[in-house]
Image (spheres, coloured by chain):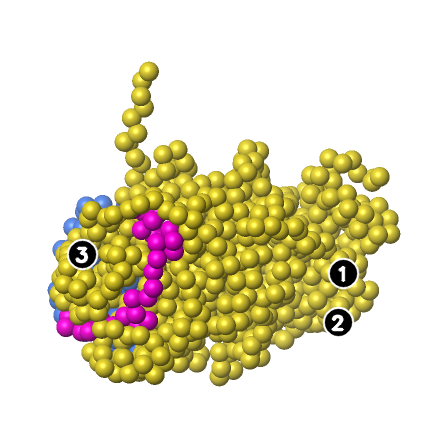
């Protein structure tokens, strides 16, 4: 029996068992405000209750890791006294309900996570996924969501003044009712200036700064932990509205305030707002926080304690200052025109005590909200997989037409339409921007560079979550190696369906275990991330879509790009053509775009070989031998060659391959561990590869104006570069045009 | 040369302008806070890009009332060199230092990319080092960069040789392809592209140094 009707508990997504735990932790019935606090803190979004037990399997340490999971962002040492803070986070559910603000506040949230640690954000990347833009029924809605998300990201990042330097964008029917918006941010900080979200020093003041608190976003975290139904469209008020200008002021003011030395700890108010920051800062510091809600700056009158504690109004921070030095902090915030108020005090009793009009409305031991949060070992069976092992018979009639179909697909085509809307140059650090295998920003403070990439592949993970996750890690690390960077650490965003379904839970478990194995192998510990579950609409789960962000370090500031630069250069395929078979061809872009099918298994990965290929390409780039460098991924060899050819100089290539593979597989299989370089010194490139025990056949040479691919003298593809380039470049804009071809039949 | 870089709340190209002047050009640079009512002992002022005061009302509409802009106006009236890039150009038109206005791009979308700029006149302190007709490659990054003015103003700008830059390929619908203009005194420049982003070989172009370097050269000649 509880003090609350069953419907109230259900609305708060508190199970009867969980309610019993609350009673035990408190030793009494919770107040309504306390119930709301437990509800958000124990939501999937905040507590990771379904995933925590498995996330523990991930590697989190290395010599370079300064801060692993558990803080606002992970931190890696980059040498010379500097460090980078980075993390990825999802805003999937809000972006479906209100695409523009959902995506914008996704950017805002992750930026706060970075500068909360004292780091100035210098780069953002986005992994975004939608239903197909030309879908017969959902197309118009998908296009609206797509445009809203892209302009929301642009709006927030451009105004804030952080460059959006890369990312990925893919389309799949499984995202029709559930787009994915994963935002990665990275900042740079001097190692002596890192701040943590800990409340220390009994008696120190607790200071609130930034936007006033309103009713927006009450229960956002709980919403993000539920499946979508028809009613979800009614949840618009739980999506918050972003103010990038306010965030920019917060950034400058927080960094300036931190420099005064009067700030003890600081945390942003993101999901679960004041509740989360209050109990987590106390929890981490082993202290308590007591706050009086009357002192919280409020946007409107009549807010209840429940609403104030659960509001997710954006652009707010909570900080603890040294007692007696408050004025130094206030002076900085006044300079930037920001509202700041002391709302409470650090206590020694490890409790979160909340007063409203002088009355205690919540009094909860911190560990009850964090450590004692439910952790479920949910049953998991075999991963859901509704596709056959064997695909259709196929025999291409025109390989050139197949290549054109893939190049003009949403997945493979140029994403210029998207990234031209993002300011990708502000801060003048972007040496390799959007559209590259990896983005590179220079670090002015050290004279070195940091490379970043995001990758995910829902199709591979649907076919085999464990192998798909490993391929994803390998691809990220290969992307970085391709531009010459050494992969050093990662952050993950796990986008899955309803974990209460054993076959979905199995996808999650397998993917985490695969990711863990690969991250150990490639020495890229996971320093933080995000789990987004319940990505289902009307009972249909998305493809299991883990997304990984990996960062790498480069000793120089000079980048190498994927485009061919000069005719007459040898083209070397580091890693070789590789093995391929039809059962492992069913997840490729060829299967998707040309055969409209999905079957079998993802490509085979030999992690030892992959690691040697990556070491080889890094050395080739470091020695300045690669005029261009591009890894093979979606669309295989033919697409990679085409992409290398889309150069300002219109430099194509003439290939003569020597392979037993059937042409479709030879041109379009997506086996990993392969990188294309053009070079004036093929002998040296081959010598390096040989030392790494990696195949490196010279498969042709660059030529002006055309792309020709032959196997043992038989021409498979022969096209002017310009024709392919034109198709690839304009495809996204064509897909965004409303289609009028569906003529309704009159009966 | 000592350059003052104005900082409004919401400026976000202020650090870039400072870095280009101090590190790429090897000159002195300092920040001028928005509520200061003097520019101090600087030789030139840069009004940088960004979103001054959030630009929620209309780009530059709030910035024109700031104390620092009164000081910049006086500095300009006394013949000081003032260059506004992107949001800086919008602020200079709002404040009346330059004619015309910047409105939403023709395509209604933010555009960030390098563009070709034709130097239309070298008779300014900002283009003295350039060759007339030369094409510079300098990035744009704006949502409201479409330059508009009435025909009489446009005719006047052309007659007085005050169109400083034109787009080689008009990206935003600007009247008569105008990317940058100067005032009648020729000491105030406004341009939508960002010279500070094209000041380092690593950024793919150093053509922005033509603008910044011309300012140094002109000041040296004037002394």
First along the sequence among labels 3 and 2: 2
CA separation in Å, label 1 and label 2: 19 Å
Q: Is residue A341 left or right of residue A534?
A: right
* Residue A301 x %, y %: 68, 42
Residue A667 seen by the camera: yes
* Secondary structure found at label 3: strand
The N terminus of chain A sits in image quarter:
top right
Find disc 1 in the rendering and name its residue.
A367
Find disc 3 in the rendering and name its residue.
A716
Q: Nearer the viewer, residue A295 or A141?
A: A141
The residue positioned 53% from the left and 71% from the top of the image is: A520
- Chain B pictured colour: blue
Residue B144 seen by the camera: no
- Name the mark nearer the viewer: 3 or 1: 3
The residue positioned 79% from the left and 55% from the top of the image is: A364
A75 inside magenta stretch:
no
Find disc 2 in the rendering and name its residue.
A201
Q: Residue A531 lies in what quarter of the image?
A: bottom right
- Chain A pictured colour: yellow
| B117, above or below A545, in the image | below
Q: Is residue A323 left or right of residue A85?
A: right
């Amino acid at each position: 029996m509880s003090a609350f009707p069953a419907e109230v508990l259900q609305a708060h997504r508190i199970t009867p068992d969980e309610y019993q735990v609350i009673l035990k932790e408190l030793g009494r019935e919770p107040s309504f405000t306390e119930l709301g606090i437990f509800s958000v803190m124990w939501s999937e979004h905040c507590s990771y209750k379904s995933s925590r037990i498995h996330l523990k399997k991930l590697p989190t340490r290395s010599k370079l890791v300064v801060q692993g999971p558990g803080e606002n962002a992970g931190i890696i040492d980059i040498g010379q006294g500097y460090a980078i803070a980075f993390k990825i986070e999802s805003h999937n559910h809000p972006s479906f309900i209100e695409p523009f603000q959902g995506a914008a506040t996704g950017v805002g949230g992750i930026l706060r996570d970075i500068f909360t640690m004292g780091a100035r954000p210098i780069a953002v990347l986005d992994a975004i996924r939608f239903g197909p833009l030309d879908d017969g029924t959902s197309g118009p809605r998908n296009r609206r969501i797509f445009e809203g998300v892209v302009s929301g990201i642009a709006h927030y990042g451009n105004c804030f003044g952080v460059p959006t330097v890369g990312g990925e964008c893919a389309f799949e029917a499984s995202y029709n009712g559930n787009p994915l918006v994963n935002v990665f941010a990275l900042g740079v900080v001097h190692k002596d200036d890192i701040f943590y979200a800990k409340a220390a020093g009994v008696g120190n003041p607790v200071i609130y700064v930034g936007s006033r608190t309103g009713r927006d976003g009450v229960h956002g975290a709980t919403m993000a932990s539920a499946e979508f139904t028809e009613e979800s469209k009614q949840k618009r008020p739980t999506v918050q509205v972003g103010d990038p200008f306010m965030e920019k002021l917060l950034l400058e003011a927080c960094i300036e305030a931190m420099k005064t030395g009067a700030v003890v700890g600081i945390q942003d108010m993101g999901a679960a707002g004041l509740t989360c920051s209050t109990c987590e800062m106390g929890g981490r510091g082993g202290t308590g926080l007591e706050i009086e809600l009357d002192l919280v700056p409020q946007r409107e009158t009549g807010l209840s304690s429940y609403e104030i504690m659960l509001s997710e109004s954006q652009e707010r921070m909570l900080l603890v200052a040294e007692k007696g030095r408050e004025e130094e902090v206030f002076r900085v915030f006044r300079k930037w025109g920001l509202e700041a108020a002391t709302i409470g005090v650090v206590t020694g009793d490890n409790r979160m005590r909340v007063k409203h009009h002088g009355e205690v409305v919540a009094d909860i031991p911190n560990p009850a909200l964090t450590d004692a949060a439910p952790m479920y070992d949910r049953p998991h069976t075999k991963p859901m997989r509704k596709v056959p092992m064997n695909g259709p018979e196929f025999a291409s009639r025109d390989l050139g037409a197949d290549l054109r179909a893939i190049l003009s697909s949403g997945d493979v085509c140029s994403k210029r339409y998207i990234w031209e809307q993002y300011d990708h140059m502000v801060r003048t650090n972007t040496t390799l921007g959007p559209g590259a295998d990896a983005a590179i920003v220079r670090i002015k403070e050290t004279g070195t560079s940091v490379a970043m990439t995001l990758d995910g592949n829902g199709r591979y993970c649907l076919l085999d979550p464990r192998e798909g996750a490993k391929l994803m890690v390998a691809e990220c690390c290969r992307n970085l190696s391709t531009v010459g960077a050494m992969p050093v650490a990662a952050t993950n965003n796990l986008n899955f369906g309803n974990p209460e379904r054993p076959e979905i839970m199995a996808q999650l478990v397998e993917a985490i275990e695969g990711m863990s194995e690969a991250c150990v192998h490639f020495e890229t510990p996971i320093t933080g991330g995000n789990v987004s579950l319940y990505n289902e609409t009307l009972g249909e789960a998305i493809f299991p879509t883990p997304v990984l962000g990996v960062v790498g370090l480069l000793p120089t500031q000079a980048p190498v790009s994927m485009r061919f630069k000069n005719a007459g250069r040898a083209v070397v395929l580091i890693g070789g053509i590789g093995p391929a078979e039809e059962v492992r061809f069913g997840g490729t872009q060829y299967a998707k775009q040309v055969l409209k099918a999905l079957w079998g298994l993802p490509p085979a990965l030999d992690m030892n070989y992959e690691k040697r290929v990556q070491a080889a390409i890094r050395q080739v780039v470091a020695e300045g031998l690669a005029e261009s460098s591009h890894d093979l991924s979606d669309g295989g060899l033919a697409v990679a060659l085409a992409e290398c050819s889309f150069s300002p100089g219109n430099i194509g290539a003439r290939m003569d391959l020597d392979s037993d593979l059937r042409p479709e597989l030879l041109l379009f299989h997506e086996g990993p561990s392969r990188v294309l370089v053009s070079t004036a010194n093929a002998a040296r490139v081959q010598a390096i590869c040989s030392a790494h025990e990696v195949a490196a056949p010279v498969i042709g040479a660059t030529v002006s104006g055309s792309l020709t691919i032959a196997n043992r003298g038989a021409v498979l593809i022969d096209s002017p570069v310009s024709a392919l380039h034109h198709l690839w470049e304009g495809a996204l804009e064509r897909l965004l045009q409303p289609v009028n071809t569906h003529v309704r039949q009159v009966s | 040369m000592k350059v003052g870089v104005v900082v409004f709340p919401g400026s976000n190209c202020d650090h870039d302008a400072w870095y280009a002047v101090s590190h790429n050009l090897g000159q002195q640079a300092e920040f001028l806070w928005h509520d200061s009512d003097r520019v101090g002992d600087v030789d030139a002022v840069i009004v940088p890009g960004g979103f001054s005061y959030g630009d929620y009302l209309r780009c530059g509409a709030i910035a024109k009332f700031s104390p620092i802009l009164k000081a910049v106006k006086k500095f300009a009236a006394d013949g000081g060199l003032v260059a506004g890039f992107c949001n800086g150009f919008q602020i200079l038109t709002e404040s009346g230092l330059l004619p015309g206005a910047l409105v939403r791009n023709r395509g209604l979308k933010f555009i960030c990319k390098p563009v070709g700029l034709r130097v239309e006149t070298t008779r300014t302190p900002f283009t003295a080092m350039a060759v007339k007709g030369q094409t510079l490659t300098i990035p744009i990054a704006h949502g409201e960069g479409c330059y508009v003015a009435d025909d009489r103003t446009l005719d006047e700008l052309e007659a007085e040789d005050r169109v400083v830059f034109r787009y080689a390929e008009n990206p935003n619908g600007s009247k008569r392809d105008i990317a940058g203009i100067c005032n009648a005194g020729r000491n105030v420049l406004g341009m939508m592209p960002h010279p500070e982003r094209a000041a380092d070989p690593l950024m793919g172009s150093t053509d922005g140094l033509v603008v910044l370097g011309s300012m140094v050269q002109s000041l040296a000649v004037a002394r």
